[in-house]
Image (cartoon, grey):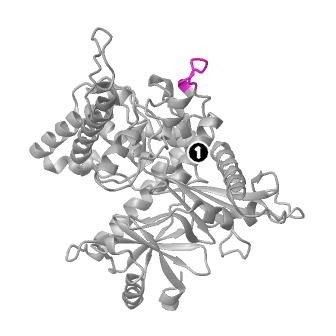
Amino acid sequence: MEAEKMDENEWSYHGEGNKSLVVAHSQRCVVLRFLKFLPNRNLMAEEVYQHLHNILDFGKHIMKQFLGENYVHHGDVVKLPLDFLKRLCLKVQTERPESRCEKEMDVSGYAMCLPNLTRLQTFPFVEHRPIFCIEIKPKCGFIPSSAHITKEIKKKVCRFCMYQHLKVAKGKWKRISKYCPLDLFSGHKQRMHFALMSLLQESQNNLKIFKNGELIYGCRDDQEYLSDLNELARQLKPFFFPANGLVGGPQCTKNVLKELIHVLTTTLLSTSADTGRAANMKPIPVSQGRNYCEASHFCTEYLRSDKHKMESTGLPKGCILYKTLQAQMLDMLDIEGLHPLYKRVEKYLEECPEERSSLLLDGPYDETFFERLTDLSLEDDGSVEYAVTKIQQYRVAMTAKDCSVMIALSPTGQEECFDSRPLIKTSRSSFTYSVSILDLDLKPYENIPHQYSRDSKIVKHYLKSIQTREEPSTSLIFPESEDCTLLLHQV
């Protein structure tokens, strides 16, 4: 990237989260990711540079080992002209959602240059062919079975389904989603189809769809929500039914969404020979806990008939969901088992603050850090070393629980032949595709007390909400031992 030729008009606002803001280039398949800070809380340029390098190193040296080289794009830290940054900041400010403007874009001079994952990752420049991309945030795909868990409901209902009740109660979302991560991670095609359809119907911030790099479906921010399935089907129809004259209406929408879900399921289950070093670790068996969530809407309907028994087909070992799930399952103690270990480390650091760097809580994210993650022993010897190992594993697991899977697809003509690129075929089309993972920043060590507190709130609210929901129905049923007397009053 040539610093002297940087033109803010070639960049446009792409999106932002709580900690960073992203702009995309109009011609090249790249984005710039900037840190965000509260006013007057900015870091020095050297601190920003180090922070960005830590993010880069963690993706490059740690998450790549779990997810594979083809899926993780770590990018580079770049130095940018200050005058360009100031002009760019003014340009994107008008495009930012008001609810995100509490924090300001960092203009100290450094950013991360990354591939634009809404595009195919096989070309450095924007292709002229149409392309669409689906971003899925699958969330945690297993139910914990740790002996440290004090509330049995956590061994029956997944975190996502419980958290839905609290988010709706707080006004974050209007309705409870029927999506359950355990359905998506089951490998059972019926359950996966149901999960993906549920995401389409109530995407919240767990599903977004881009067309030629522009968001056409999903949640741009809490205040802006594109959720018209008929409009989505109209926009995607040329990809799946290029020349058959399929008219609009409910049947058209149904057919397009059916094809889309088929493509997504096939892509998520496709395997890759690209295995990171973590593939050599002993796999953590999913069967330690139950393979379905009692709150799943699919499972509720499916199990209502005595003929059915809920089974998990299992994920192919090389697919992206399997790799993500294995990283998630490094959380072997649950936050209830981890919190005492956090307090053990905090007590040690109060007595020996100079030892913090040797514990690698702030990096570097290198070979030594990765080696600690491979120790899956649960025998607590009371040492600080054991506590730190479990904490680091937990932080990696939480990162995997909050990552996003990006699936970019572009239709191919029958005359085209791509020997080196994977293809997916539908009833009327075929697509070349790429799968990538983003949002792989390591979760902060300092967040553990907050996560412990939030876990308690989620469980407490869920138990209260299901109790409230059950009470009215039981009050309408007369116990068999009591007589029912009908009183008639003269009118």
Residue 430 locus on image (x, y percent): 79, 57
Residue 253 shown left or right of residue 185 in the figure: right
Single out the residue that lies furthest toward the right.
Answer: 415
Tell which of 429 and 194 is nearer to you.
194
**Residue type pointed to by label 1:** Ile
Q: Quadrant of the image for the C terminus?
A: top left
* Depicted 324 relative to depicted 341: above or below: below
* Depicted 354 relative to depicted 88: above or below: above
37 magenta-colored:
no
Residue 32 locus on image (x, y percent): 47, 74
Residue 439 locus on image (x, y percent): 45, 57
Single out the residue that lies furthest toward the top.
Answer: 481
Residue 426 shown left or right of residue 372 in the figure: right
> Is the stretch drawn in magenta largely helix, strand or loop?
loop
- Judge the density around disc 1: few (<14), some (14-19), many (≥20) Cα neighbours within 10 Å: many
Tell which of 138 and 105 is nearer to you.
138
Mark count: 1
Whether residue 340 can be seen here: yes
Tell which of 322 and 213 is nearer to you.
213
The magenta region covers 303-311
* Depicted 10 relative to depicted 136: above or below: below
Quadrant in the picture for residue 145: top left
Quadrant in the picture for residue 245: bottom right
Classify mark 1: helix, strand or loop.
helix
Whether residue 285 can be seen here: no
Quadrant in the picture for residue 428: bottom right
305 magenta-colored:
yes
* Depicted 324 relative to depicted 2: above or below: above
Single out the residue that lies furthest toward the front.
Answer: 491
Residue 200 locus on image (x, y percent): 56, 53
Q: Residue at x 24, y 36 (%)?
A: 460
Residue annotated with mark 1: 320
